[in-house]
Amino acid sequence: MPRLALYALVVCVLAVAAAVVSFVNGNWLGVVWVLLAGASSNMWWYYRRKARASA
């Protein structure tokens, strides 16, 4: 797995965890974390597909 894909996956997992913690605490800032998780998930898919196509 390429390094950028791995970084994007880590950011996605951390953003999901932060969103869960925010929503459990009743903070609506979790919406921002959900959006960040979605963006990093798309980046992960892109870099993963790019690496498979070049292999």
Image: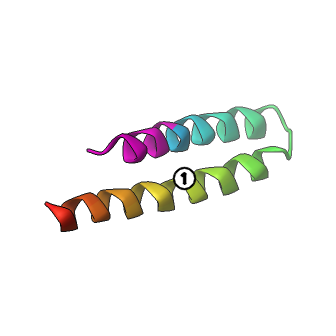
Image coords of residue 25 (percent x, y): 81, 31
Asked whether 26 falls inside the magenta stretch, the response is no
Asked whether 3 falls inside the magenta stretch, the response is yes
Which corner quadrant holds the C terminus?
A: bottom left
Residue farthest to the front?
Answer: 54
Corner quadrant of residue 17: top right
Image coords of residue 48 (percent x, y): 31, 57
Residue under the image location 86 percent in, 39 percent down: 27
Residue under the image location 25 percent in, 58 percent down: 51
Q: Is residue 1 left or right of residue 39?
A: left
Q: Which residue is mark 1?
A: 40
Image coords of residue 44 (percent x, y): 42, 54
- The color scheme shown is rainbow
* Mark count: 1
Q: Nearer the viewer, residue 38 or 48?
A: 48
Q: Which residues are magenta?
A: 1-10
Corner quadrant of residue 39: bottom right
Residue under the image location 68 percent in, 41 percent down: 19
Q: Is residue 42 left or right of residue 51?
A: right
Above or below, 37 relative to 15? below
Q: Nearer the viewer, residue 7 or 21?
A: 7
Residue farthest to the bottom?
Answer: 53
Which corner quadrant holds the N terminus?
A: top left
> What's the amino acid at mark 1?
Ser
Q: Is residue 28 left or right of residue 53?
A: right
Residue farthest to the left?
Answer: 55
Q: Nearer the viewer, residue 44 or 29?
A: 44
Image coords of residue 7 (percent x, y): 46, 39
Is the stretch drawn in magenta largely helix, strand or loop? helix
Residue under the image location 30 percent in, 45 percent down: 2
Binning the other alpha carbons within 10 Å of mark 1 as few (below 14), some (14 to 19) or many (20 upward) gives: many
Q: Tag 1's secondary structure?
A: helix
